[in-house]
Structures are given as structure tokens and as C-alpha cells.
Image (cartoon, grey):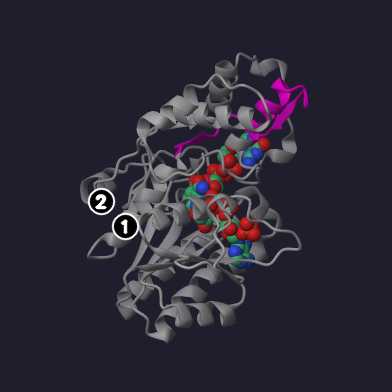
Amino acid sequence: MKRALITGITGQDGSYLAEFLLHQGYEVHGIMRRASTFNTERIDHFYVDPHQAGARFFLHFGDLSDSSQIDNLIYNIKPQEIYHLGAQSHVRVSFDIPEYTGDVTGLGTTRILEGIRRSHCDARFYQASSSEMFGAAPPPQDETTGFLPRSPYAAAKVYSYWMTVNYREGYGIHASNGILFNHESPRRGQTFVTRKITMALARILAGKQTHLYLGNLDASRDWGYAPDYIEAMWKILQMDNPGDYVIATGQTHTVRDFLEEAFEYAGLDPDSHVRIDPKYFRPTEVDILKGDPSRAIRELGWEPRITFRELVRIMVDADMEQIGLEPPGEGKRILEEKKFKWLGRP
Ligand code: NAP
Ligand code: GDD
């Protein structure tokens, strides 16, 4: 049985990846940080008591700022695959806490890579690199595009990207970068723009909120569906040779497009509810991201299955349902049709 170790297990991607790997028959270990309340909402639906016979899912406390526990876990678990997804992942917040972001999102990667090197374990390593690293580089962006980071978060990710490449070349570690463009889902953190929009929409429909405050509506992103992208992460580590892959849809849409698509689907006019609050603007913005996933399509045999329009419907349906409203249902139908067999809940 293959063993995988996931950092960021409680996050959007960590929760989907754990579910996917468990479905593939893996033993899955996740690192979560200690909080005063439980932050396991995204993984509760597949959590099983580790004392139960045949249990294959184990959680460990740890923090990316603390190498002692990271070393212990890598040495004791001896995973064949390590998916490093943990990070301070919010771009706007990284301007407020640049030092912390550098420590966790940047140095955290080095702590894992050093753990692998020093324990002499032959784990394959996946680094959650980001399209945000391209920053001001004009689209379309692919594996040959130079990085022009525009935030402390992006700069930390560029550092992690190059550490991954260096440990691959210097120590022969099977270390790969997945350069993932924005990917969203009903499990997306509530302060990222897509989820902020779909949650506010559901709350407005339910009469719990009247207005939605946003920042720059003109920024363009290449938005995909997180479960699609999880499958790409796994495929990257199944390759005989490590490498770096852009994972994207190849389509780009503005924040305004997302807003209009969501409100229109639910039968509301965004102009009556949306207001601009300058506090959501960033000191430096990434204007447009549009990935070229040709290499992933060619070498990994990966392709996104969910379109932008479908993604919006999936997210609106899920948030309406969560608040107790009957959703239009198109999103639920799309998920059934596309058959993500490993998905316990959206
Ligand atoms: P997310 O939902 O914000 O999850 C981040 C995870 O990291 C959470 O489990 C969080 O724990 C954990 N974490 C944060 N600080 C930590 C620390 N000091 N020690 C240990 N764990 C810590 O992010 P995501 O959307 O799943 O993204 C996963 C990874 O992919 C991140 O590295 C992100 O930067 C990268 N990425 C994401 C996208 C995207 O569009 N989603 C695109 C490209 C790259 P808590 O639950 O306790 O907060
Ligand atoms: N969060 C947020 N909140 N963003 C807003 C808002 C708002 O109220 N209004 C407009 N935006 C704009 C931002 O300025 C940005 O241009 C765009 O919406 C997307 O913002 P986010 O959803 O916060 O995502 P991001 O693109 O900055 O970063 C995400 O994607 C990266 C990959 O490109 C994160 O998941 C990163 O961790 C990831 O690496």
C-alpha cells in the first residue's frame, strides 16, 4: 500500500487530495496545525477513527515553521509521496504579513525538502507552485514564461519553486512543481473572490445580507475546478521523471464576468447589490492570468473537465443548498454527469 504525506490537509486542496488518494487505496497522513477550535470541517466527512481496524487516514499536529516535527514525521512515516500544499495562501493578506508569509510559504518548503534529504527517504515531492509567480508576465503563461512576482506571497512561491528545482538537480530528489492556476470549489476559503461572491449571493437570496463589497473587478483569472486539478497533482508524481507543469484551463475571465455569471444564474442583478470597497485593492495587482496547459495535456494526459460556466453553477448551487435554499440544480447535475467518483461531497 502506498503512503502519502500531505501538508495543508485541512485546506481546500488538501481535503480533496486526501479523499482522492484514499479512493486510490493509499494510506494518507496529513499535517494540521494546532488551533484552539477544530479546523477540520473540510475533512470531517471522510475522517475515520485511526484506532479502527484497517484505518488508512491519520492526522498529525505540525507547523510549517517548525522543522523538528516535519523531520520526525518524514522519518517515521517514510511516505512514498509528499504533497506540499500547506501555505499562507492569501495574496492580499501576504501584503499585511510579508515576513510570516516568507517563513511559512517560502521557508516551509525548504524545511520539507531538507527533511527528505536528511532522512534519506526516497519520497517523491510535489510543490504547490502558483500562477501568481508569473505576476506581470503577459499571457498566455507556460513553463517557459519568466516569473515577475507581484506580491510577498508570489515571491515566496518563486523561492519555493527554485528550491524544488535545486533539490531535484542537486540531490536527485524526485521533486516536481505543479504550477497551478486559480482553482475553486464549494470548499474554497471564504475570502477568495469566487467563494466570497457565491456565498454572498446565497446570503442575499436568503435575506441575510443586502450588499457585497469587492475590490478590483477588472482582474482576469484562469479559473478551474479544484477536483480536476487534484488529479493533475497525482499524475505529476506518477511520472517516471520529475518536472514542472502548468495546470490551467487556457481560458480567462474577469472578476466581473464571474460576478455576472453567478448573479444571472440565480436570477439577480449584481448592480443592485455590489459595491466597491478600496480596502480590497492590492498595492500591486496581477492583471491577467491565462495558462497554456499544453505540456500537461501532452505528457500527463490531463485535461480539465469542468468549464468556467459549470464551475460557477457548481459553486452557486452548493452555497444555496448550504444556506437552506433550493438551488437551480444545474451545478449538481453537471457533477453527476462528469462523475468524480471519489468525491464524497462537493
Ligand atoms: P488553503 O485552502 O488556504 O489551504 C492552506 C493549508 O495550509 C491549510 O490547511 C492551512 O491550515 C495550512 N497552513 C497554513 N499555514 C500553515 C502553517 N504555518 N503550518 C501548517 N499548515 C499551514 O489553500 P488551497 O487553495 O488548498 O491551496 C493549496 C496550496 O496550493 C497552497 O500552497 C496554495 O498557495 C497553492 N495554490 C493554490 C491555488 C488555488 O487557486 N487554490 C493555485 C495555485 C497554488 P489551516 O486550515 O489551519 O488554515
Ligand atoms: N480576495 C478578493 N476579495 N479578491 C478580490 C476582491 C475581494 O473582495 N475583489 C476583487 N478581487 C480580485 C483580486 O484583486 C484578484 O485580482 C482576483 O480578485 C482574485 O483574487 P483571489 O480570489 O484572492 O485569488 P488570487 O488570484 O489573488 O490568488 C489565488 O490564486 C493563486 C493562483 O493564481 C490564491 O488561491 C493563491 O493562493 C493562488 O496561488
Magenta stretch: includes residue 211: yes
Please check the rendered image and state whether residue 181 is part of the magenta-colored stretch, yes or no.
Answer: no
Can you give x and y, in whole percent of width and height, for residue 183 in the image?
Answer: 48, 42
Q: Amino acid at mark 1?
A: Ile
Query: In the picture shown, does residue 17 fall above or below 224?
Result: below
Any mark on residue 165, and which? none
Mark 1 falls on what kind of element?
helix
Q: Residue at x 68, y 67 (%)?
A: 34
What residue is disc 1 on?
A: 236
Residue where numbered disc 2 is placed = 300
Residue 3 relative to residue 269: left or right:
left
Q: Quadrant of residue 302?
A: top left
Q: Position of residue 261 (x, y in %)?
A: 53, 21
Taking the image as shown, residue 309 lies to the left or right of residue 260, namely left
Residue occupying the point 72% across, 63% down: 35
Which residue appears farthest toward the front when viewing the image? 53
Q: Residues within 10 Å of mark 2 (few under 14, many from 20)?
A: some
Question: Mark 2–mark 1 contact, CB under 8 Å?
Answer: yes
Q: Where is 317 relative to 142, above or below?
A: above
Residue drawn at point x = 47 percent, y = 56 percent: 18
- Residue 76 screen position, x and y as percent: 47, 82
Where residue 159 appears, x then y in whole percent?
Answer: 48, 65
**Which stretch is magenta?**
196-224
**Residue 34 appears in the rendering:** yes
Q: Is residue 48 above or below residue 279?
A: below
Mark 2 and mark 1 lie on one chain; the one further toward the N terminus is 1
How many marks overall?
A: 2
Tell me the residue at 36%/39% (across/down): 140
